[in-house]
Image: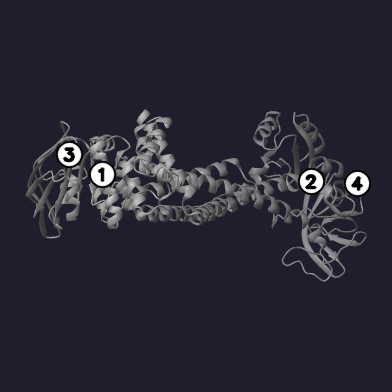
Amino acid sequence: MIVAEDLTRVYTMGRVKVRALGGVSLTVARGEFVGIMGASGSGKSTLLHILGLLDRPDSGSVTIDGTDVLALSDHRRTLFRLNRLGYVFQDYALIGELTALENVYLTSLVRGDQKEEYLGKSTEILRRVGLGDRINHRQSELSGGEQQRVAIARALVNNPSILLADEPCANLDSQTSKSILDLFARLNEELDQTIVMVSHEDWHKEYFCRVVTLRDGLIEEVTECRRA
Amino acid sequence: MTAVFAGLKVSAFLAWKTIERGNTGTLALTIMIIALIFVNLIFLPSIISGVVETFNTQSIDFDLGNIVVEPREGSQYIGGVTGLQKKIERVPGIIGTSPRIAVGVTLFYRGSNTASTLYGITPEDERSTTRIADFMTEGEFLANGDTDAIVMGAILAGREGEEGGGLPSLEGVMVGDSVEVAYPNDETRTYRVKGIFETQSFGVDTAAFVTGDEASEVLGLHDQASVILVKTEVDGREEGYKRELLSYGIQEEVWTFREKTGGVLDQAIQSFNIINTISTLVSLIIAVVVVFIVIFINTVNRRRQIGILKAIGIDQQIIINSYVLQVLFITAVGALAGIVLAAGMTAYLTAYPLVFPGGPVYPVVETSAVLRSIASLFAVSVLAGYIPAWQVAREDILSAIRG
């Protein structure tokens, strides 16, 4: 469960101060699929970065599963991201020299998991995202949709409490985007996976349980569970 | 400890995959540059060691023996040479002594003349002490009892129609020819050339030898010598033998060959070392620049990827270490390739040695020089790889991700 209270964040760009968040409070329950939407510059990515421990707010608090994550040291934050969070980025961010399987089990290696364990887990998660026959292919041999599926598998391999996705369909065509969103929805339903996803596509709303719309760094609207 | 080990395992995994599946052309080129830098690091020291080795060997074998006994201060000659020889040869480890009478003479041959040093020697003693007799290119070395014979170095003998180019030369003396020798006491003798030797040591190949009996007779000496050369059983322990000789009550001046040649050789080595230091510095700077550029470009191009790795929970030290391990691999393979190249170079220069005034110089690759080169190459490479990796890896995650 994520509890964020009164988050503010101001960026200084030269002499100009830009208010990215002006006091946002948000609670995401376990098993929710929350969409963060809004126009460009509304603060949605900033909010996701703060929830994902990639950035620190100027004020406010963030508690994830009871842990005050803003009080953690940099090293502890790294470990928290490794063990508790999963990320999916807009441009997949795979390591080109690694195969799909190696990209997926990389974080398990860091965790010190046993070889049989991480090979089994990674192969299974790749099969689950529909890449069972592509595990030994490298990034250059995969389509955009397949690469994003590898990134999702990488994010899920360590059973994270929360999956954070920053516009994961931005570089994909609508057909592939749909297949990725279907996959997210399936993970949310079957595994009760908590997902927080940033998007600016209106048609994505049908996948979210709840949509938080930001405008000028403030929550403009919260729309409860559109999906049945 | 487990976390550290797991971290190193991941670093090694990332490093190996990058090496295995990265750009092979860049990798091969970088390794080749490191190999050539390694060769450059050991080439000059091996030549310097070769020069020292050649100079020492030439000095011992042809010019000075291991130890030189000279007259006491104020005396021109050593007296009672026969007794002194026996005394010296009683010292354990002394295997030969050769008294020499040295005199500056002028040699005349068919209208040409030149000044040189003539040594009066006891042939049998000289054979036990120096190796000049083994390097006869024409004729024979002197024998005890020869009175009208002379042997001379190839440079002094010269070649017909060729001037010595600043070195003493009789321009074409052959075995069997007669040469006239004018001594400083105005005595003149005619000798038949019995043999010509070539040691490739300029100082020796410009000298001539007659028997000690002949020189003594001309100079009016009796059981006297300018110097006694001493040959020891083992090279390199001259200081010990010198102390032993002094403890036997020898009153004359006793020098090791290093003490006699030290000044000249030290100056040459100092000059060589300055060149070597400059060359080493330039080589290491090239290594730093090459490794730095390779890793810098690599990390800057992967700035976003490094940010992502940190975002998904991979510690920045793991990322830095993966680059350091890549550098270690490149340096290790480069040094290995360098050793192979250096071995090839050494084999070639051993077959076709460089010719220096002191004689042919064979490269002497010392283990310490190789280890020093490897250590310095690793040190600068790791530093040059660590800095750019550290610069990029410590960057704020969001800045890195935004590129």
Report, in whole angstroms, how far the alpha carbon at label 4 lies from the one at label 3. Answer: 111 Å
Q: Name the residue under label 1.
A: A184
Question: For the residue marked with disc 1, what is the amino acid?
Answer: Phe
- Label 1: how many residues lie within 10 Å, few (<14), some (14-19) or many (20+)? many
Q: Mark 2 lies on which chain?
A: B
CB of mark 2 within 8 Å of CB of mark 1? Answer: no
Q: Name the residue under label 4.
A: B143
Left or right placement of residue B240 versus residue A56 in this view:
right
Mark 4: secondary structure: loop
Question: For the residue marked with disc 2, what is the amino acid?
Answer: Arg
Labels 4 and 2 share a subunit:
yes
Q: Position of residue B268 (x, y in %)?
A: 59, 53
- Label 3: how many residues lie within 10 Å, few (<14), some (14-19) or many (20+)? many
Q: Mark 2 points at which residue?
A: B100
Q: Name the residue under label 3.
A: A32
Labels 4 and 3 share a subunit:
no
- Label 2: how many residues lie within 10 Å, few (<14), some (14-19) or many (20+)? many
Q: Where is residue A145 in the image (x, y as percent from the top left)?
A: 34, 52
Between B295 and A145, the one nearer to me in the picture: A145
Labels 1 and 4 share a subunit:
no
Q: Earlier in the sequence, mark 4 or mark 2?
A: 2
